Amino acid sequence: MSVEKQYIELYEQCRAMVNEHSAALLNEPRDKAYEDFCRLGFPTQKQERYKYTNVAEAFAPDYGLNLRHIEIPVNPYEVFRCDVPNLSTSLYFVVNDRFYDKVLPKVSLPEGVLVMSLAEAAKDHPELVAGHYGRLARSRKDGLNALNTMFCQDGLFIYVPRHTVLERPLQIINILRADVDLMVNRRVLIVVEEGAEAKVLFCDHAIDDHQFLATQVSEVYVGENAHLELYELEETHVKNHRFSNMYVDQQRSSTTTIDSITLHNGLTRNRTDVTLNGEYAETRMFGCVVADKQQHVDNNTLIDHRVPNCQSTELYKYVLDGEAVGAFAGRVLVREGAQKTTSQETNANLVATDTAHMYTQPMLEIYADDVKCSHGSTIGQLNEQALFYMRQRGIPLDEARMLLKFAFAGEVLDSICLEPLRDRLHYLVEKRFRGELSKCEGCKLCK
Amino acid sequence: MEKNNEQAIIQEIAEKKYEYGFTTDVQTDILEKGLNEDVVRLISEKKGEPTWLLDFRLKAFRYWQTLEEPTWGHLDLPKINYQDISYYADPTIQKKSNSSGEIDPELMKTFDKLGIPLEERMALSGMAVDAVMDSVSVKTTFRERLREKGIIFCSISEAVREHPDLVRQYLGTVVPYRDNFFAALNSAVFSDGSFVYIPKGVRCPMELSTYFRINARGTGQFERTLIVADDDSYVSYLEGCTAPMRDENQLHAAIVEIVVMENAEVKYSTVQNWYPGDKDGKGGVLNLVTKRGHLRGKNSRLSWTQVETGSAITWKYPSCVLSGDGSQAEFYSVALTNNHQQADTGTKMIHLGKNTKSTIISKGISAGYSQNAYRGLVKVGKHADGARNYSSCDSLLLGDKCGAHTFPYMDVQNSTAVVEHEATTSKISEDQLFYCNQRGIPLEDAVGLIVNGYAKDVLNKLPMEFAAEAQKLLGVSLEGAVG
């Protein structure tokens, strides 16, 4: 419990300060989370779901926390442009854990739609936040949820009321910005009500050369007949540690697409739990990971089929170079009575060096008989014959390799419905394979 | 499909008597229940073991005491009271007391009843049997004929006495006593199992087989089998097991170690039919076994074939460590669970040598209220260039109260490795059933046919005699268990 100690003590000393700079609704579950954290501590690698990532080690260094919520003097609109520009999105910024509301996009959102700071929302619209906050991401069983609930002071709130269609995608840029090594505990709450539609793109960036540790807990509610597309693009740097826990609750006939793309990172751990609570719901999950050096990417997913007639598809692809470590553990759970479930899970991986390490664990757990479930997983290399064919036609080896890798990752990228984003990602991935570390062009903070 | 008819058939199956559930009334020397150092010493003493083996046992026992029972399996394992088990039961006491050395006729009868005749003239030619009841080997047939070729086939206690150097050289080198909780327990208290040594260049002329039988009440069976195939040799080994019907859980924690040297080949087949418990899940054998083969030599080959139909709980992963360059390993498994049986079984393929190959074919069938899980690891080490693995796991669900699970693990550390895994879960296709029905094949026969066809890939790998038995077993447990 030595690593936990510093966080427990910090909370005990700063409880009042944490509360002061947050909202009552967020403060409420803190003490309970504190008790849970004291009991659970950080998850260990002996726990099946945390087998491939040493959580305690990542939390061991002494990070600063901006508990006083001192505003960081930066106008992200001026200093930063994301790698995914010109998407005609509604662009918002979250700096560390704080929603940037000084300058908001000119485009007005349909009536009733809210994109705002979670702490503000908790004060201004408690009726919307109260029923949802902390309902999916429980601190009782997961030490990371508990820690996040203890310290999170703000974050993002997206609300799309019933039968409202958001034509324009929302683009949220998470920027990590600090002058010291910093720990950020961010919270995201997305509520898409009955019959509503939304597309949300998250881009994660770290723009200072400091060690960052970001925990993000997201709760996503997708109502009946609602449709949500969620894209997460991580382009941070090697000193960044990201722990993301996302919980999705889907109601009848809803569809959700979750796409998580990791192009640049230090240590990334994404946990995504989707619960299908209404019949005829559909989940599509995609992931693409390109990692080299000592990068570590661990995607851990659970799709919980609780009711009959639901569908789920999962496709994750990894390309590992250098000394990168990749892990994928996908569990599909079909509960008793969830008949007529269709589920397909695929994980394909390219391991390009002997020092890279891939772990994969596609799991099926099935308690109903009238189901069609399958999973497939491969670890291998580029096809020699295809390489030979291309060289024969005068394409140099490196170029041929690049083309094949690109085609390999392309399958995931093609699943993206937002056309400009898809094109942009094709470009970014290609650039990534060409070995050009993607510096965010146009960003004044990058030298 | 007619619900009533279906229910009636399921009922019938559920109530079907376990054919091998009888007990043998034979005078048995049973050690008092409980486990401590004195018990370990006593077992060693009864077997007249040398000091090095006693030391091995004691080391294992001391280590076992520091361990906690594992809980990570997808199983609901009942609490085992290790002090409430007798660790040694010898049904051959009469043989020792009478001077002629004759086997108790009761024992002969028992094995006859099980279809394992111990008299060589009656036995199937081409199969040598080591019959083990409780903790002691009753008889090993065809020993002389095998000895002519230099093959050693006897119980492990005999091997300790007669070939101590060989046993000492290999015992515990594949499954060390520190391997896991049950391996440590076995290493401390193990009793008879078989020892097989095939010398260089010898092809074993007949199938070797061991038949394990638990008979005494309140005991566990902790057998230990060690197979060593020296360079260029070949052996096919079979294992069968049954136990009486009891409403207590009986523990079976065995270790099987196989060493395969250069160019040698070992085929290990199991038809496991321990008592599975009654239809409410009462009683039955807890089958917690560590089986591992070490492919030490170049181009060595090992194949595990298992048909698992018995046991209340099966928790085992027959594994292969492929350290010889060019070695090949195979794992074929059919695991069938019915009523309240639980199985968490699969394999581990650990690729360490260059150009090694492994294949995993696993077929799970769950019926009733049972839970059937496949769990397998494929690991490719840093230096295992050119490693190749193909795994395929299919599950068939018969009924909506049972579960079928797949937990494959793949760890790859080499850029030239090719590892593939695929799995499907489904129920018997209505179309196939309809097709059979249409041609006048009744429902239950159709299910039997389809399931046997489904398991064919694995059954084909079994030696002839066993294949017939396995097919019968599958048929018995499955007829009409679906609709």
Image: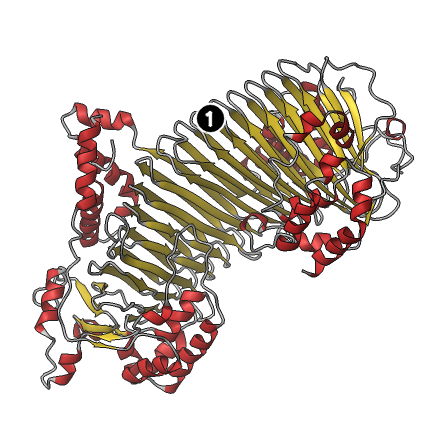
Q: Quadrant of the C terminus of chain B?
A: top left
Q: Residue furthest right?
A: A73
Note whether residue A410 is visible.
no
| Image position of B470 with respect to A383: above or below | below
What residue is shown at x 33% (from left), y 35% (from top)? B400
For label 1, the residue is A310
B368 is higher (above) or lower (below) than A281: below
What residue sits 58% from the left and 29% below the top?
Answer: A411
Q: Quadrant of residue B168?
A: bottom left
Label 1 amino acid? Answer: Cys
Residue A383 at x, y = what percent?
55, 38
Look at the numbered disc 1 and give the secondary structure of its residue: loop
CA neighbours of label 1 inside 10 A, class few (<14), some (14 to 19), many (20+): many
Q: Nearer the viewer, residue B130 or B267?
A: B130
Name the side, left or right, on which A437 lies relative to B358. Answer: right
Give me the residue at 17% from left, 75% from top: B144
Residue B130 in percent (x, y) is at 21, 68
- Chain containing mark 1: A
Location of residue B127 (image quadrant): bottom left
